[in-house]
Amino acid sequence: MAKKDKKEAKKLDPRILEISKKLKELRIEKGYTSYENFAIENGISRMQYWRMEQGSNFTFQSLLKILDGHQVSLSEFFKDFDIRKK
């Protein structure tokens, strides 16, 4: 079996990319130009939040904490998602 090259191995699932994109959009819509300010004000590690906006280091606990900070429910957050893994 051939080894995958590093770029192929690090390719992120498009669903994760959509979640990270929406997190960033929510933050900006709420008036936070800096991810750091949002993270600090909502008790989230700055580095962890940055990773989530980049599409890595996702845990449901972290996602829920961020959604709570935005006062957005899971159903509201995921209502426009229609991406399926191919």
Image (tube, rainbow, N blue to C red):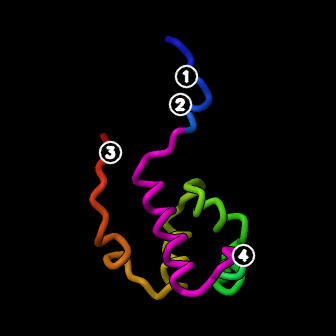
Disc 1 residue type? Lys
Image quadrant where residue 37 sits: bottom right
Using the numbered discs, state the Cα–Cα distance from disc 4 to disc 2 in whole angstroms.
Answer: 30 Å
Q: Is residue 10 magenta?
A: no
Query: Which numbered disc covers residue 85?
Result: 3
Residue displayed at 47% across by 55% down: 17
Residue displayed at 59% across by 24% down: 5
Residue 18, x across and y down, in percent: 43, 59
Task: Report if the CB atoms under discs 2 and 1 are less than 8 Å apart.
Answer: yes
Q: Earlier in the sequence, mark 4 or mark 3?
A: 4
Q: Is residue 43 above or below residue 49?
A: below
Residue 83, x across and y down, in percent: 30, 54
Q: Residues within 10 Å of mark 1 (few under 14, many from 20)?
A: few
Disc 3 residue type? Lys
Disc 4 residue type? Glu
Image quadrant where residue 86 sits: top left
Residue for badge 1: 4
Residue 27, x across and y down, in percent: 56, 78
Using the numbered discs, state the Cα–Cα distance from disc 2 to disc 3 in whole angstroms.
Answer: 16 Å
Residue displayed at 32% across by 45% down: 85
Task: Answer with left or right where residue 39 lies relative to residue 27.
Answer: right
Task: Answer with left or right where residue 81 lies relative to residue 39.
Answer: left
Task: Report if the CB atoms under discs 4 and 2 are less than 8 Å apart.
Answer: no
